């Protein structure tokens, strides 16, 4: 018995009727030294509070966690790792920039 929902559609040549097969965005896993990074800042408002985001980092997960721990301690604020970026509570762009510069990270101009 034929599927009544296809109505003449042909799903060969790589086409699929399942819309849940989404291709994941590929994250580069290149590990770069701090001098080779080209970081930039973004600011978002979440539930009325400001979040400062700095990305993209090309580090291993453990190195990124270690960097987050150092920066949270120096800045005295909360933060988290999301994929290849660091998110910090508050509008702390200038302070974050200063600390990352001392760790030899470079930024987009």
Image (tube, helix red, strand yellow):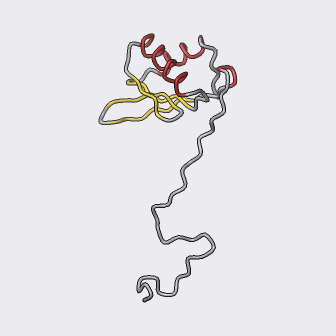
Q: Which residue is drawn at 65% across and 21% down?
A: 106
- Count of marks, rendered view: 0
Q: Residue at x 45, y 16 (%)?
A: 69
Q: Where is residue 17 in the image (x, y as percent from the top left)?
A: 48, 72
Give the residue at the far bottom of this rendering: 1
Q: Residue at x 51, y 31 (%)?
A: 85
Q: Is residue 109 at least partly visible in the picture?
A: no
Quick check: 40 above or below 15?
above
Task: Say whether residue 108 is left or right of residue 8.
Answer: right
Q: Where is residue 52 in the image (x, y as percent from the top left)?
A: 44, 28
* Quarter of the figure that contains the N terminus: bottom left
Residue 76 or residue 17, whichever sits in front: 17
Q: Position of residue 71 (x, y in %)?
A: 47, 15
Classify the position of the C terminus by image quarter: top right
- Residue 27: image quadrant is top right
Residue 58's image quarter? top right
Question: Left or right: 83 with respect to 107?
Answer: left
Task: Give percent across and percent down for residue 26.
Answer: 59, 45
């Amino acid at each position: 018995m034929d599927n009544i929902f296809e109505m003449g559609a042909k799903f060969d040549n790589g086409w699929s009727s399942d819309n849940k097969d989404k291709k994941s965005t590929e994250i580069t896993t290149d590990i770069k030294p701090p001098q080779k990074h080209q970081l930039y800042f973004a600011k978002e408002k979440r539930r009325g509070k400001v979040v400062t985001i700095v990305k993209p980092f090309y580090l291993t997960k453990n190195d990124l966690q270690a960097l987050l721990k150092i920066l949270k301690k120096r800045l005295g604020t909360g933060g988290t790792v999301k994929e290849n970026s660091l998110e910090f509570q508050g509008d702390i762009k200038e302070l974050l920039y200063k600390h990352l510069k001392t760790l030899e990270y470079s930024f987009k101009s």
